[in-house]
Amino acid sequence: MNIFGDFYDNLAGEKSKRYIRELDKAENEYELPRDIRNKIREEGVRTRLPWLYLLLVLIGLRLVLGLVTLQVVSGLEFSQKVQQTRLQTVYLAAVRGIILDSKGKPLVENMPSFNLGIIPADLPKSKIEREQVLNKVASYIQISSEEIEKSLANKEGTLEPIILREDIPREEALVLEEKLLGQKGVSLFISTHRQYQKIVGLSHILGYTGRMTEEDIKKHPDYLPTEILGKSGIEASYEEDLRGLPGNEKLEITPLGEVRSVLERRDPENGKNIQLYLDSELQQHVADALKAGMEKSQAQAGAAIVMDVNSGGILASVSLPDFDDNLFFKSGEGSEIKKLFEDKNAPLLNRVIAGQYPSGSTVKPFIAAAALNEHIVSDKFRLITPPYIEVGQWKFLDWKPHGSADIRQAIAESNNIFFYALGGGYDKVQGLGIDRIKAYLEKFGFGLPTGVDLPGEAKGLIPDPEWKKKTKNEAWYIGDTYNLSIGQGDFLVTPLQLVRGIAAIANGGKLLQPYYVSTILDGENHPLKTFGYRVVSENFITSENLRIVREGMRQAVESGTARPLQSVAVAVAAKTGTAQFSNIDKEKTHAWTVAFAPFDNPQIAVVVLVEGGGESFEVALPVVKEILEFRFGKKE
């Protein structure tokens, strides 16, 4: 206030002096009397000074008004800008559904996982402070601050966490929490990862999950980039059910990154649970029996499957070698995963659904059913079978002399000559011919995908003249038909196709859709949807002809190639098979055995394959025996 007072006094003094100078000039010009001059001086100064003071007051008010405008109006405007907010959507992850066996035992669980991450919106705004935080984080997790900056690119101001390290052991997570506690924007997040039960062969069924790749993001634009999804097995086939739906919160955020309010919230929908037909106890026993059979023959690979013949449900399914599906979620397991992909024994291949092999003599029950249905022979017909059939320069041999045989005996003893005749014709037997053989094999589900609820199924191969011409540029000969009639040559099947075909013989001619999953459950394990007993086709073979085939398979156990199965507590029907797979070394063979039981009231069908195992009687048949004795017990 003193500053403004001095300013006014100085300004008034200057005006008064100028006025007096003007007055002196007038006095000199007009020579006014002194008394008049003095009076004019007094009145002039008195008259001018109030106007002068008024002017100065107006100038002061203008300055004050300017300050008020700056402090109040502009301050209010600035305050409003500070209070402006933005909207941010934060997604809430759903809990993935679990997978259960037929008795409700969890085969996979969601385990807590500690992950270190950064929330970009919470990082310090100062560049120096931000660098200090990132450098400190980098020093504790062995990652460069440049890499962290790269992961934060285009994520400024978001509340969605950027995960820098996953699946940290609990003890290490506690240390990191202590070391990094209080660092702005740095947090430990608790999520879940899948922990699979270590039951042999289960990995091919359940599969595994993994983080989203760029390709996955393109395929699933509705997924969050941070989600996990099923990559193989049941995890992939039932992804939509297991995943659930993420929720979200719409937040009001201040420029300082603080949450002012939650405007909207949609809770996540947790994934549904999946129950399998699988009996985990049976699964483990099948795996143990198959491993023992492989070790006995020094085989490196094999497959075994057990199916419910009345529903199509898969009760056990083992492919060896297998793998640990828990590896695929653990960080730092790259070298182990690489070994799996490079292993010449292909442990990642699910041989049950994707392995393709010559069937050997296990095809004979299907050829017999087709021949009976087409009236090529009757069950009363007998054929005297020589040691071999000669066609030109080629000889088609049998594995032993059989003499006279009817169709039941031919199945029981695996008589090659009899089946050459049924397929390609011999002596008085016309034979089915390639077209009818192919048609009936397709009716039993060969050469076509089964539609099983696992990804990666192979369809096998039924060769015919058109295929051979296209593939090998060769004509079809009678020898090709003979080879197909006993499951040799280019005919290829999967164990799943074979067990489904045997189930159709056992259940009276219903070709069923195979299923691994029996039921979709809600979070309380109440059924939402059931699977099973879907008939793909039926009545393509008469029940009478199927009965004859079943009796031939039963005779194989009573007096033929499957006699060791007499030890099972229930009556069993079976067929063995030994399949050549090398044109160079004819001694190399796959060992097969197929069976169903009980004979009078079939419940299950079993198929066992030991790759390169040798003779079925010595390798595959004992595995089937172990499985059936576990399921039904031994004879007293």
Image (cartoon, rainbow, N blue to C red):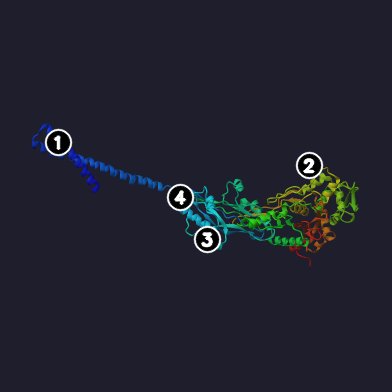
* Residue 379 seen in the figure: no
Tell me what residue is drawn at x 8 percent, y 35 percent. 33
Earlier-in-chain disc, 4 versus 2? 4
Q: Which residue is label 1 attached to?
A: 23
Earlier-in-chain disc, 2 versus 3? 3
Callout 1, which amino acid? Leu
Q: Nearer the viewer, mark 3 or mark 1?
A: 1
Q: Which residue is label 3 attached to?
A: 176
Q: Nearer the viewer, mark 3 or mark 4?
A: 3
- Disc 4 to disc 1, how far (Cα)? 73 Å
Q: Quadrant of residue 303?
A: bottom right
Estimate how packed mark 4 is, as few (under 14), some (14 to 19) or many (20 or more) residues with alpha carbons within 10 Å.
many
* Residue 202 seen in the figure: yes
Callout 2, which amino acid? Lys
Q: Where does residue 11 sit, x and y in percent of width and height?
A: 22, 42
Q: Secondary structure at mark 2?
A: helix
Earlier-in-chain disc, 1 versus 2? 1
- Discs 3, 4 touching: Cβ within 8 Å: no
Q: Which residue is label 2 attached to?
A: 470
Tell me what residue is drawn at x 53 percent, y 59 percent. 140
Q: Which mark is residue 253?
A: 4
Q: Nearer the viewer, mark 1 or mark 2?
A: 1
Q: Where does residue 65 sit, x and y in percent of width and height?
A: 29, 43
Estimate how packed mark 3 is, as few (under 14), some (14 to 19) or many (20 or more) residues with alpha carbons within 10 Å.
some
On-image quarter of the C terminus: bottom right
Q: Where does residue 388 sit, x and y in percent of width and height?
A: 89, 52
Q: Secondary structure at mark 4?
A: strand
Front-lying residue, 370 or 228: 228
Q: Secondary structure at mark 1?
A: helix
- Disc 3 to disc 4, how far (Cα)? 28 Å
Q: Is residue 517 left or right of residue 10?
A: right
Callout 3, which amino acid? Leu
